[in-house]
Amino acid sequence: MLNLISGENMFTKSCQYAIRAVIFLAENQASDKNTGVKEIADALHVPQQFLAKILQQLSRHNLISSVKGPNGGFYLGEDNAEVTLLDIVECMDGKSTLSTCILGLPNCTNEHPCPLHHHFYGSREGLKATLSSCVVGALVNGQVLSAK
Amino acid sequence: MLNLISGENMFTKSCQYAIRAVIFLAENQASDKNTGVKEIADALHVPQQFLAKILQQLSRHNLISSVKGPNGGFYLGEDNAEVTLLDIVECMDGKSTLSTCILGLPNCTNEHPCPLHHHFYGSREGLKATLSSCVVGALVNGQVLSAK
DNA sequence: GATAAAAAAGATGGTTTTATCTTTTTTTTT
DNA sequence: AAAAAAAAAGATAAAACCATCTTTTTTATC
């Protein structure tokens, strides 16, 4: 589930962890060594096994790359160069809510809008634009990433 | 929990139902008759008992008004004339997430922002502005409200 | 080939959200 | 006063989300 307004967070936990992990991998893109789950989990202060599941899912969808065995781990390769925030959100939480009615009404359209439709149109388009234009590989600037 | 981006909806189910119910009450503001849970639930096609809980909570927080007994029900009175979307969201889902870090990082600030901070700043401010400026009593225009 | 490291996968449990059922309280009408 | 209508409240359950533990598979190194 992805709730943009109500709730404690704009992204789900899974999605937050996923984004932070991918940005972390992007920061290590230069190095030719892989990064293990443990190392990422320790750096970001997130539950290791939960993060493992998330990385597996990202890898299955080819948003990140992985190698098994000793010296194995995860990395961002050329295949992952164009991955955007929208890719990650949709991978973790399903198709983004940003195109469906904000009140969940199936018959809400531009022609027959719900009472909130026009009020949120601009902000929602802005969010969509940001999500689809943010290539995670470019989000590296040494800013705050880890918590606690 | 209120997730603005990830998940299926921008608002939680509770919040969606709450907003739709309050707008429905606003449409009946003119009438001096109260509206019962059953009538609202039928009109909006939402689970009656779940909606009852939601209306109780809205009533406890004085966002809507209620009377018990025969011919009882809910209504929007003068006390509720200034209720905004933000009031409803915070009543149902707690203080909005729109001021906390989008990645859930406790040490993210304007001076030491997370990698997403500036990208989402504008849209988030827009959402906040809409939520706090939308008085639900004014959202009545006969638009689509019920689902199914 | 044996060992070890690491991702992948399977199974299980806790918490929150969503939803339903039942009982109680309030209040109007008869 | 009795009956009925309706909100209020309590208890329970299903589903989704969050998290952990265990086992399996892959693969590099010895």
Image: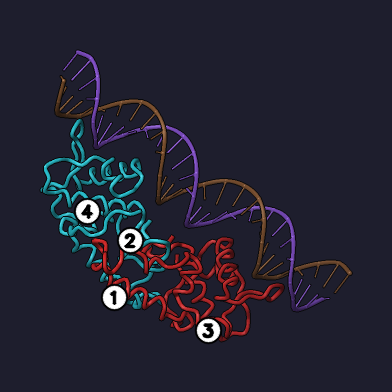
Chain colours: A red, B cyan, C brown, D purple
Contact flag, marks 3 and 2 (Cβ < 8 Å): no
Amino acid on which disc 3 is placed: Ala
In the rendering, at what x and y percent does residue B96 appear?
Answer: 30, 60
Circle 2 residue: A107
Check disc 4 and report its element: helix, strand or loop: helix
Nearer the camera: disc 3 or disc 2: 2
Residue occupied by mark 4: B23
**Nearer-N-terminus badge (3/2):** 3
Three-letter code, disc 2? Asn
| Total numbered labels | 4
Task: Give the number of the mark in front: 1 or 4.
Answer: 4
3D distance between C-alphas at marks 3 and 1: 26 Å
Same chain under badges 2 and 1? The reply is: no
Tell me: residue B71, above or below residue C11: above
Q: How many other residues sit within 10 Å of disc 3, few (<14), some (14-19) or many (≥20)?
A: some
Give me the residue at 26% from left, 71% from top. Answer: B125
Rendered residue at 62%/72% (across/down): A36
Chain of the residue under label 3: A
Gap between marks 3 and 2, in whole Å?
Answer: 38 Å
Position of the N terminus of chain B, as image quadrant, is: bottom left
Query: In this orientation, which residue lies closer to the viewer: C10 or A22?
Result: C10
Discs 3 and 1 carry the same chain letter:
no
As measured in the structure, the alpha-carbon distance from the residue carrying label 4 to the one carrying label 2 is 17 Å
Q: What residue would you read off at disc 1?
A: B122
